Image (cartoon, helix red, strand yellow):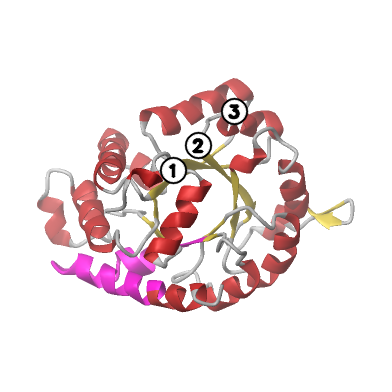
Amino acid sequence: MLNSLFEPMNKQALIAQIQQKKSFLCIGLDVDLDKIPTHLLAEEDPIFEFNKQIIDATHHLAIAYKPNTAFYEAYGLKGWAALGKTIDYLNKNYPEIFTIADAKRGDIGNTSTMYAKAFFEDLKFDSVTVAPYMGSDSVEPFLAFEDKTTILLALTSNKGGLDFQGLKINGNELYKEVLKTALTWKNSENLMFVVGATKPEYFEEIRKIVPHHFLLVPGIGAQGGNLQEVCKYGLNKDCGLLVNSARSIIYAGNNENFAKAAQLEALKLQQEMVQILSLL
């Protein structure tokens, strides 16, 4: 376990963890009870038990975990309780790990403040994903929290991502305007941006706008994103990337050895990252 240097979890702590673990891997904990090994269904809390075993098997390879809150909300109070137990387990046992609530929140100011309190103060996540559509007063309440990170959706990896994000505004695609405008918001140094791995050719232009911010990159693995292509254009001097993989890691096995199978898949990605980081 890394030492207290990593408390609180700020940008410098994240960079230090990348250097120590030689990894910029984020693992998505998107738990579907229809996909987890059936023997876990006999557990009192199968979601938490699944997460716990995945975390214990991969924590030395990953620098972040990202539960998508929809996969917990879908199971009602039991699902939300499992999310709480998961984040508590991470914070207690692996405090160096950067935690991401993939909640994609965003609303008028006083509502955003309550969302921020829910994830930063109650659940004690290090970061939360936020939608930019409602503008500065919907995002700045998240940015007001010291040593917390707000991860703004910029260019997503889904099929319809460019329906709006790719529209031209003042001669620029909308996602570029989002990036430029976000940099003018109060405490914008606390921002990270979501940029999908399935669009690696866009990273070069994005880095011209946000050269120093971290990018959260979903889409590696099951969605078809290519790690080498992402890194070719997306790396900066601090690495500057958190590359997320979920299904291809957590569902690599479906029997009693599922956690070991997840570890082996995570190791494959981490070993690629060792080579990539050695070139920085």
The residue under label 3 is which amino acid type? Pro
> Quick check: 159 above or below 183?
below
Q: Secondary structure at mark 3?
A: helix
Residue under label 3: 141
Q: Which residues are magenta?
A: 242-270
- Return the residue nearer the eye: 149 or 52: 149
Residue under label 1: 9
The residue under label 2 is which amino acid type? Asp
Residue 90 position within the rendered picture, expressed as x and y whole percent measured from the top left: 29, 46
> Quick check: 119 above or below 212?
above
Q: CA distance from mark 2 to mark 3?
A: 13 Å
Q: Name the quadrant containing residue 273.
A: bottom left
Residue under label 2: 147
Query: Mark 1 or 3 closer to N-term?
Result: 1
Query: Mark 1 or 2 closer to N-term?
Result: 1
In screen coordinates, is 244 left or right of 167? left
Question: Which residue occupies 35% across, 54% down?
Answer: 29
- Does the image show residue 122? yes
